């Protein structure tokens, strides 16, 4: 970056934040996800930098660092959004099975297609298929403002479940090249351990939040959550469950039936902490998501993404995702179809997991440009669908 002054760099960084805020407002009117606008801004910024002769070299781990941090914030924000109650059993059940079955069917179809077309080992095709089968909560959740409350609630749950399921399965497959009863048993044991640890750490974090008199306690919590996430990864535990359970516990404190615990941490006090935590989490997620997608757009090599071979394969993959989602909503749920069927965007999780594919599991005959093309095309389909959607107050998800 020797050709760019510190003042210009600060001007660019602050302008990106302001621009992202404007994109968030603009996306509500033009119904284009702000993430796509940020990607486009990153691409334009790269063109300007090349034209001006700015030698901007991004550290190889910077985008991945922002992605991991953003992932923790997204999962925490999802946990803080998930409200558990008896009247939500139907929507939670429907959204969970929608996320699970659509993920499994999409993964099966994509992996089989890659295996048949490329002739490479099936395990590699499965690993590549996982990121492409995960619904992006980082794109879906900010795009729900035009939907009815019932549709919005369903998609928030589904996107959150899709993230968790996809990440857990990716980590499981990467850590276990062979599927066996022992490996599956170890997965369930690690999930159980993570849940127990999450309850323990949640109580510890709550003590810090409730009892600390310092004004810096919330970013201390974020540091501890990232520490727990990384520590869990090093111990081969599904550590995102710790983050999710903490968020859900904070947002559902009324379900804690232990009177002694309720006496120490009254419901009213926890609700105040939860509201403030939710606000700070949303702000932090916005900032991280902004720089992540701008830097990703800046680092994209467009030529491989728009080769004929890449576009054909990418279009087939997106067609599979759309078809499977349509069939599931049409023949299984039978309650809602539009615009839920077009919510197939791939985003932050897809990018992050692609970066985490080990070298020995990478496909030799498939360009990573396909990732960008699938992200772009799936988001465009959602955008076009939302343009034709009109809010109807009568839109509800019927209870069974």
Image: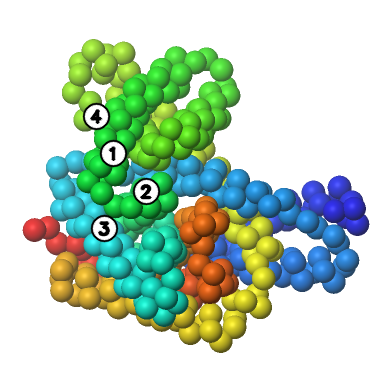
Q: Which mark is in front, 1 or 3?
A: 1
Disc 2 or 3, which lies upstream in sequence?
Answer: 3
**Residue, disc 1:** 186
Q: Does 300 appear above or below 283? A: below
Callouts 3 and 4 close, C-beta under 8 Å? no
Q: Is 144 in front, or is 239?
A: 239
Q: Secondary structure at mark 3?
A: helix
In terms of sequence position, does the residue under pointer 1 or pointer 3 come before the other?
3
* Image quadrant in which you'd find residue 200: top left
Residue identifier under label 2: 176
On the rendered structure, is 200 left or right of 2?
left
Q: Quadrant of residue 278?
A: top left
Q: Is residue 364 above or below residue 200?
A: below
Residue at (25% x, 42% y) in the render: 182
Mark sitting earlier along the chain (2/4): 2
Residue bearing mark 4: 254
Query: Of label 1 and label 2, which has the lower sequence position?
Result: 2
Q: Is residue 51 visible?
A: yes
Structural crowding at the residue carrying mark 3, measured as other residues with C-alpha within 10 Å and reported as few (<14), some (14–19) or many (≥20): some
Reply above or below: 324 against 151: below
Asked if marks 1 and 4 touch (Cβ < 8 Å), the reply is no
Q: Secondary structure at mark 2?
A: loop
Alpha carbon distance from label 1 to label 3: 20 Å
Q: Which residue is mark 3?
A: 100
């Amino acid at each position: 970056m020797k050709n760019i002054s510190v003042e210009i760099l600060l001007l660019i960084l602050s302008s990106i934040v302001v621009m992202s805020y404007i994109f968030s407002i603009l996306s509500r009117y033009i119904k284009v996800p702000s993430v796509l606008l940020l990607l486009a801004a990153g691409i334009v910024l790269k063109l300007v930098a090349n034209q001006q002769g700015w030698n901007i070299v991004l550290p190889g781990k910077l985008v991945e660092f922002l992605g991991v941090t953003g992932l923790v914030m997204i999962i925490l924000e999802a946990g803080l959004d998930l409200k558990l109650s008896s009247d939500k059993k139907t929507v939670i059940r429907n959204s969970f099975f929608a996320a699970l079955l659509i993920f499994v069917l999409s993964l099966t179809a994509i992996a089989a297609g890659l295996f048949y077309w490329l002739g490479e080992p099936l395990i590699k095709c499965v690993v590549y298929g996982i990121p492409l089968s995960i619904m992006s909560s980082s794109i879906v959740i900010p795009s729900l403002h035009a939907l009815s409350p019932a549709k919005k609630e369903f998609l928030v749950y589904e996107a959150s479940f899709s993230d968790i399921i996809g990440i857990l399965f990716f980590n499981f497959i990467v850590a276990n090249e062979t599927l066996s009863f022992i490996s599956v048993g170890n997965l369930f044991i690690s999930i159980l351990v993570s849940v127990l640890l999450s309850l323990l750490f949640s109580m510890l974090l709550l003590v810090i939040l409730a009892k600390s008199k310092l004004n810096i306690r919330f970013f201390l919590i974020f540091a501890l959550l990232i520490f727990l996430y990384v520590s869990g990864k090093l111990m081969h535990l599904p550590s995102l469950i710790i983050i999710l359970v903490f968020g859900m516990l904070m947002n559902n404190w009324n379900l804690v039936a232990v009177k002694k615990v309720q006496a120490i941490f009254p419901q009213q006090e926890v609700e105040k902490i939860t509201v403030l935590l939710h606000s700070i989490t949303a702000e932090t997620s916005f900032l991280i998501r902004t720089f992540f997608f701008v830097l990703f757009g800046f680092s994209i090599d467009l030529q491989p993404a728009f080769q004929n071979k890449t576009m054909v394969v990418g279009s087939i993959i997106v067609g599979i995702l759309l078809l499977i989602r349509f069939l599931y909503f049409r023949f299984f749920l039978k309650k809602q179809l539009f615009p839920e069927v077009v919510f197939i965007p791939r985003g932050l999780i897809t990018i992050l997991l692609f970066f985490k594919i080990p070298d020995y599991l990478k496909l030799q005959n498939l360009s990573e440009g396909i990732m960008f093309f699938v992200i772009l095309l799936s988001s465009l389909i959602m955008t076009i669908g939302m343009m034709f959607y009109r809010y109807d107050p009568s839109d509800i998800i019927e209870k069974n």
